[in-house]
Image: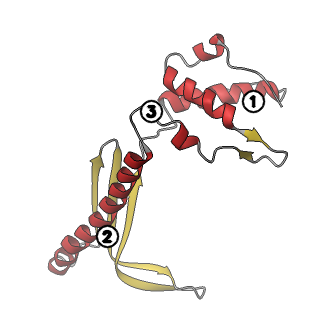
Amino acid sequence: MSKEKETPEAKDEFDGKVSQRVIALAGKLQGMMKGTNTGLITGMENAYEENLPEGLTMKHVKLKDQYDRDMNCATRLAQGRVSIPLMEEHPNITETTVEFQGGAATFGGTFYREHKVPDGKDSTKTVYGHHVAYYEAPIDSSKGAMRAIASHLNTLAAKALGKEPVAS
């Protein structure tokens, strides 16, 4: 296992795309992690709470989490209540969609006139008024900090494993 440490030179590889805040937090998390011979990394049980920014508490996090759950449920209910009469009036509408921003996250859903779902007996059944909700956090691995980190780790892993790094 490579014991290579982050150096100022390695930090420069991020080309300013990874904040010092993220790099410092990664250092704290790395210090908490314990690798096992099965590949499982432990020691993270309290990592989230112990590393909250100053002034932010788990009470705040739990309130926000509950609000997001409530928003998802309320969106589903409201969308269904708007969609059903719309579908009654317009037989050509097979689905409705809604999407909106909530802070940096995106909430949304699709309400289907009818949809086939597994029946639990190796077959399907048709349900009417089926809804699929989603909540997307703003993490995009194809650009910015996540891409810089992925490229950095790809290079470190290739070198540690005696392989030639491949551009990602």
- How many marks on residues? 3
| Residue 168 visible here | no
Q: In this view, does 157 lie to the left or right of 93?
A: right
Please name whichever residue, 90 or 101, is drawn nearer the observer in this view of the structure.
101
Query: Could you tell which of marks 1 and 2 lies nearer the N-terminus?
Result: 2
Query: Label 3, on which residue?
Result: 53
Quickly name the residue at label 1. 157
The amino acid type found where label 1 is placed reads Ala
Query: How far is the residue under mark 3 from the one under mark 2?
Result: 38 Å
Q: Nearer the viewer, residue 20 or 121?
A: 20
Mark 2 = which residue? Answer: 111
Does residue 113 lie above or below 132 as drawn?
below
- Seen as rendered, the residue at the extreme left is 89
The amino acid beneath tag 3 is: Pro
Residue drawn at (58%, 13%), measured in percent from left and top? 12
Asked whether residue 67 appears in the rendered view, the answer is: yes
- Position of the C terminus by quadrant: top right
Q: In which quarter of the image is the N terminus?
A: top right
Q: Marks 3 and 1, Cα distance to the nearest angstrom?
A: 30 Å
Q: Which residue is most to the top?
A: 9
User: Against 114, is 39 above or below?
Assistant: above
Secondary structure found at label 3: loop
**92 or 146, which is in the foreground?**
146
Viewer-side label of 3, 1: 3
Foreground label between 3 and 2:
3
| Circle 2: residue type | Phe
Helix, strand or loop status at disc 2: strand
Question: For numbered disc 1, what is the local secondary structure?
Answer: helix
Q: Where does residue 104 sit, x and y in percent of width and height? A: 34, 41
Q: Disc 3, disc 1: CB below 8 Å?
A: no
Q: Position of residue 32 (x, y in %)?
A: 67, 36
